[in-house]
Image (spheres, rainbow, N blue to C red):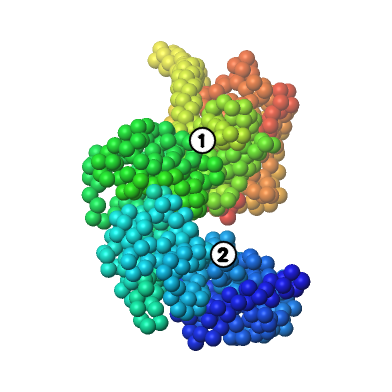
Amino acid sequence: MGASGRNRIDDPARLQALHATGLLAAPAAPVLDRVTRLAVRLLEAPASTVSLITADRQVVVSAAGTAGPRITRESPLTRSLYRHVVTDGAPLVIGDTRADERWRALAENAAGQPAACAAVPLNAPGAQVIGALCALDVTARDWSPEQVRALEDLAAVAEPEIALRTARAGTGTPASGEQEPVFLRALLDSLEVSVMACDEQGHLVINRPLRESLHTDTPPADVGSWLQAYRLYGPDGRTPLELEEMPLFRAWSGERFTGQQVVATTDAGPRRFLVNGRPIDAPGGHRLGAVIAGHDITDSHRIGVLHRAQQAVTRVLAEAASSREAAVGAVAAVTDALGWTYGEYWQVGEDEASITRVGAWSRPGRDLSVFTAGHPDVFGRGQELPGTAWERGAPVWIDDNAAARDFPRARDALRAGLRSAMALPVRSGDQVLGVLVFAADHSQEPDDDLVDLLDGVCAHIGRYMERRRAEELTLALAESRRRFEQVVSRVSDNVWSVEVAADGSLRSMYQSRTAALFGRPLPEDADVPGLIERRTHPDDRAAYASFLDTLRAGEPVDVEFRVQGLDGVTRWLWMRAAPRREGPRMFIDGISTDVTDRHELAEQRERLLLQQRQQMERLRQVDELKNQFLRTVNHELRTPLASVRSSVQLLHEGGMDAATQERFLQVLDRNSVRLEHLLNELLLMASLNAGDAAFTPAETELSALARQAVQAVTARGDTGHLTVTVHAPGAVTAWADAGRLRHALAQLLDNAVKFTPPGGRIDVTVTADPVPSIEVADTGVGIDPHDLPHVFDDFYRGAGAERQSIGGTGVGLALVRKIVRMHGGDVQVDSRPGAGTRIRLVLPDPATAEAATRRAPVR
């Protein structure tokens, strides 16, 4: 402690004023106890004390609170934190004594010292600091400026008690005549608190602080004039006090009281006082007058009111189920806390073109129908009080509705008894979300301090409204999405949206029915665009890439392409899409439809058209075959019939010898056999084509069958000019109809004999590996390449046969193939002009031949 600080502690005038209070020896100080209790409550502190500082010690004369640090009535001055309040004459505010270098050692050495404290000077008359009013906490905390001011207000409430004790000590006997009022006035003016005193004749003495609070230099000189000039109201600010409730009257009546709250009307508006009072009696009990001391707590009360309002708003916002309910609750809490009459909350529309009233509250019992009836619920920017506060983004204050010519609604408000109004913008950053409007029954001068304090409430409401609006928009979006999903779920198409990245890649944002694309659903985070690109049919990748390039260029487009699904099925997709931009971001929205059925129908139609063309060609071929058949039959029948007719005619004429007659009979027999053979072939062809030819397969030995067929041809004498050889390694068994197979071999041997010149060879080879087969090879003229694809067609005769006038019906090889296919086998032909012909009959494996022969014959 410096020398100057020590001098203030030891100042004789200060110590005299301290001892004159009598508090050091007083057994109790009820007024100070009430002040410390108020400090505990208002500052939400665990403990509060009034500590007096003597020359060598600290004395606690009042303490309140149960959860605070240990309070010692007396302690050495070296262990006192509050001596600095006396030495500095200013508040001492410490958030953490253990973290502050100035107080750490003291806190560690003095058991029970607080972890945090706020202390303000306590003055005796003459502005002598005799001690401190303190708020204490056992844990570190930050003391707000509002809390320190509230503590100073409470100290001012305690100072009248100190002044009264000092005055009583200084006037042990009544002063004479005119000296008493002079002394009393001088004493009262020296105090920092508001004091009013009266003598037994009702003359008033009002000190300087009270005159300043009442904004007057010429206060009433007697009690009657005072009561007429300044009407007092109860704590609610609306209920007038009766005469017997007036503080001065109560004190004159002999009542001692502390902490009575009263509201006085002044030219500057209502002011709130916390009043202590007591009578002034002579030692003999004679009533000399009364004195009341009060402190103007208007500002601190307002802070407390707004604190409670903010707590009420916080509670309302926490419990509100909707933004409308929150708006009404917040308006009610603030309006009621301010003691005003009516409040509204106006919300700026999402289009920012209008502002709408979403909640209002009026004090119960007040009929405001003349103002609220037909009250518009929507205003534009700059219209009336809400629209003006919205447009300006700043508070708008109407201190008297009678003079508010710019606001037509003010006239209706005035008729309803509302004298003043104000509007405060509710913000979120620089954006105005809404406007709070309040109206009161009394004129109200613009109060910047009140506006500043309400800004905190508005900010709280703004944050809530922004968060609530975001939540409601989220819920609305979720509901819209749910409805959208319901609609989309009824659509068989895939509705999708992707974002185009800066590098051109695609990121899926939404997919409705991926199963429509891939045969089964995909996870929500699946890379659908990449999957489509990878599984696009190779033949369609160029078309799909062009589709994407067009979209990236900002043009709508559609495409049809094939995609192989995850189920292995290839589907045709029809994609229609259009790009859109949201600021710098680009999105593509589209619909994908499975058009596989349409493509299959189109393909089926093409197949039907192809089949129709093939049928037409087949009909044309059948027609050609018919003509060929007619030409063949005409040729093959006409010659033997002519021979038969000539022979029969000659036989009828007679006159021929027996040898000639026998020769003509042989001609008739030979031609009749030829005709019978021709008819049998034609009937067999028709039967095989109709699928009703008899077929009785059994185990057949092919080598024996081949030898029998060769013997039959040789027996007719047609092979004398040829060498015919059978090559059979041994028994080769097949499941076959021996008669049908023998007929096929006969046809092959007949053709080989016809088309092989004298001196040629015919080889018949039977093999068993890998499957049973019979091959007939000749060294004949061979088959023209042009004719080779058609040699097995019905009634087809090659050009070589026509040129060489080799007879035949064109049904031989056709019958051979039909018979072999009846067995489930096939015919292979290899031939070149001049190099002979090799025809191989391939039969199926005997193990499966039985099942194969049961199939319908192939025509």
Badge 2 marks a residue whose secondary structure is helix
Residue 393 spot, x, y in % from top left: 49, 39
For the residue pair 677 and 70, the one nearer the viewer reads as 70
Relative to residue 384, is residue 47 drawn left or right? right
Residue 520 spot, x, y in % from top left: 51, 50
The kind of residue on which mark 1 rests is Gly
Residue picked out by circle 1:
590
Whether residue 490 is visible:
no
Bin the neighbour count of mark 1 within 10 Å (Cα to Cα): few under 14, some 14-19, many 20 and up. Answer: some
Which residue of the protein is positioned furthest toward the right in this rendering? 3
Badge 1 marks a residue whose secondary structure is strand
Q: In the rendered image, which quarter is residue 100 located in?
A: bottom right
Query: Residue 45, labelled with which disc?
Result: none
Residue drawn at point x = 42 percent, y = 32 percent:
382
For the residue pair 386 and 599, the one nearer the viewer reads as 386
Marks 1,2: beta carbons within 8 A: no
Relative to residue 399, is residue 542 drawn left or right? right
Mark 1 or 2: in front is 2
Residue drawn at point x = 31 percent, y = 49 percent:
441
Q: Earlier in the sequence, mark 1 or mark 2?
A: 2
Residue picked out by circle 2:
148
For the residue pair 288 and 164, the one nearer the viewer reads as 288
For the residue pair 562 and 659, the one nearer the viewer reads as 562
Residue 259 vertical placement versus 739 (above, below): below
Residue 99 vertical placement versus 355 (above, below): below
Residue 494 vertical placement versus 41 (above, below): above
Label 1 to label 2: alpha-carbon separation: 65 Å
Q: Which part of the image, by quadrant, shows the N terminus? A: bottom right
